[in-house]
Amino acid sequence: MKKSLFFRANCKTPRPSKIALLRPFASSFLNQPTWGWSNREDRGSKAVTRKWPQNHRFFWRGEFCNWLFILMFFVAATLGASPKALILIIASDNVPIYEAFQESWRSYMHSDPEHFEAYFLKGDPSLAETVEVRGDVVWVKTKDQFPSDGPGIINKTTAALEYFFPRIQAEFDYVIRTNLSSFYVFPRLLAYLETLPKEKCYSGGFTTPGVMMASGSGMILSPDVVEILLDSKRSLYNNRHGADDQIIYRILAPRGIRLKLHDRLDLFCLEDWIGVKGNIPPKIFQFRIKSPDEKRVPDDAIVHRELFELFYQTKN
């Protein structure tokens, strides 16, 4: 199903020339002479012709101007609107560092509700319903699992997309499926979203060099791409043939959906962060923090905290 024209409008601010194109048309229409406008009424055997008042053209001119300016204002406001994204964060409470990651995310994930709406995705096989939303957590009736252990991540992703799909069509320009270990700089992310197409958008960082597949740590999807995935949900649910990003790629690639690559800064240890934190390229909006397991506590928590202090407690 396609969204209306207003929701699918390009998000870039309109140039004045676009509105100006209407002026010649409006001027021509309003200044046309009114040749013999009349109103005929039949009264029994007599036909009465009444001429409109001499100033009727000014009445219609005023009415047309009112509606024209309302239309121009609405179109300009719609075209100038910034994009809005739904952020779905794969999460669980199974690993000690994940508690610190959730605390990090919550420090900024609700900071810009005009442009971003974010939820954690967690599994609970004992749920009565397939999906339950409690605050900023979407609970899905499945297990929390790593891809090597089972289909928990792809199940959570599919169930959440299906649950939110009516709102995705009506309210959101993009869906960002990411994970706990990622950190986003929202102002920079918003600037990047403004450059993306509103259809056939599949954007992310590499998971394997040379393979045009978005990493599961962060993929950006337009609503029509979400619809393609949901049309193939039987191929998603309980799919054990690969990680979630591989499964999604295998559905999108044959349908001509190509990856638009974006940069991501991967930090594999605290020393990586110390070496780059004074010289981060301005186009970087996503960081992936994943130290070796024995160093994730407290090293990764330190990196998350310092990223927050750098980008959200000081001027970007």
Image: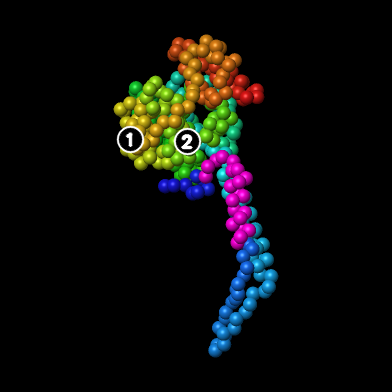
User: Image height check: is 134 above or below 1?
Assistant: above
Q: Nearer the viewer, residue 9 or 176?
A: 9
Residue drawn at point x = 58 percent, y = 30 percent: 187
Measured in 3D between alpha carbons, the distance from the residue under mark 2 to the one under mark 1, in whole angstroms, is 21 Å
Task: From the top left corner, tell me how far across and down residue 125 is, in percent.
Answer: 38, 31
Which residue in the protein does label 1 denote? 254
Range covered by the magenta-colored residues: 9-29
Residue drawn at point x = 42 percent, y = 41 percent: 224
Task: From the top left corner, tell me how far across and down residue 185 is, in percent.
Answer: 56, 26
Please rate how many residues cluster around mark 2, counting C-alpha atoms within 10 Å: few if below 14, some from 14 to 19, many from 20: many
Main SS, magenta residues = helix
Q: Nearer the viewer, residue 299 or 268?
A: 268
**Which residue occupies the extreme bottom position in the image?**
45
Mark 2: which secondary structure?
strand
Residue 175: image tag: 2
Q: The residue under label 2 is which amino acid type? A: Val
